[in-house]
Amino acid sequence: MLGRDFLSVLDLSPAELEGVLDLALGMKRDGPGARSLRGQTLALIFEKPSLRTRTSFEMAMHRLGGHAIYLNAHEVQMGEREPVKDVARVLSRMVQAIAARTYAHQTVVDLAEWASVPVVNALSDEEHPCQALADLLTLRERFGNLGGVRLAYVGEGNNVARSLAYACKMTGAHLVVASPHGYELPPEVLARVEALPGEGRVTQVFDPHEGVRGAAAVYTDVWASMGFEHEIAQRREDFRGFQVDAALMASAPSDAIVMHDLPAHRGEEITDEVIESPRSVVFEQAENRMHAQQAVLALMLGAAL
């Protein structure tokens, strides 16, 4: 993926996806070693605040010998203070890559179109590919080969679920998404999954207990992501029964692990009892953002070649 954009899990072939995970595992085990981005700089453009995304990208560049510059929404004001295409062209003359955490997916698409350096989607309303890499890395550490691993995702078919759907299909895992009616994976996403190479499967169900039966891992996310806070009252009603609590986990195998991309709204989509239980791997997931993104940046900027 040298010099290429990473806007979607779909930008990777199954072999490239496995290669990123292999490299991330090796870097986590052995450190970055001689793979260095010394002298290279990553610009971080954030329209949304973040703990994990900012810290993991900055630490990934630091561990690879490079540097990161953080630009928040107030400083840049893409599309208001100046056009996205101007931001892309200015930064391309000063940095070696751009990571953007945006509301609209079109913003990262426009950045990639106008930038002459690689662009990474650090989150958009369509996908969260870096989170999916960290999630698969966490599952690889626990289960080894991802082939046949059943992952239950309890919640909305949002950007995280979409990226996981593409990644699971390509790596041989079975993703079961359990959502309330009206919040399921969009038909176009399921169609893309069907067209992808790989032995994995994606199944949409509407009963959370059905979703978690036989699952090796149970994953959930907030009911109202940033930008949808005004819908929280309605969503609390719509997601009634979809909380990952002790009662729901009783329908899963006793050794199933619990996953969440954080931040968690404890008492809404997940209980404190479950997220603090020995089954929880949420902090391993958070750490793995750094290792997965370190591998992506090394491959993208040539340090791992």
Image (spheres, rainbow, N blue to C red):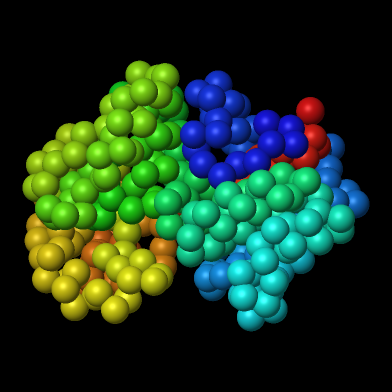
Q: Position of residue 210 (x, y in %)?
A: 10, 42
Residue at left 41%, top 63%?
262
Residue 216 visible, this orientation: no
Going by the image, does 198 lie left or right of 104? left
Going by the image, does 28 lie left or right of 246? right
**Residue 149 vertical position relative to residue 228 in the rendered view, above or below:** above
Tell me the quadrant of the picture where the N terminus can be found.
top right
**Residue 176 vertical position relative to residue 81 in the rendered view, above or below:** above
Q: Position of residue 271 (x, y in %)?
A: 23, 67
Residue at left 77%, top 40%?
301
Tally of numbered tags: 0
Tell me the quadrant of the picture where the C terminus can be found.
top right
Q: Position of residue 244 (x, y in %)?
A: 20, 58
Q: What is the quadrant of residue 79 in the picture? A: bottom right
Residue at left 54%, top 25%?
13
Going by the image, does 269 lie left or right of 292? left
Residue at left 43%, top 57%?
125
Residue 191 visible, this orientation: yes
Q: Position of residue 87 (x, y in %)?
A: 73, 63
Q: What is the quadrant of residue 59 in the picture? A: bottom right
**Residue 282 vertical position relative to residue 218 in the rendered view, above or below:** below
User: Which is nearer the eye, 108 or 17?
Assistant: 108
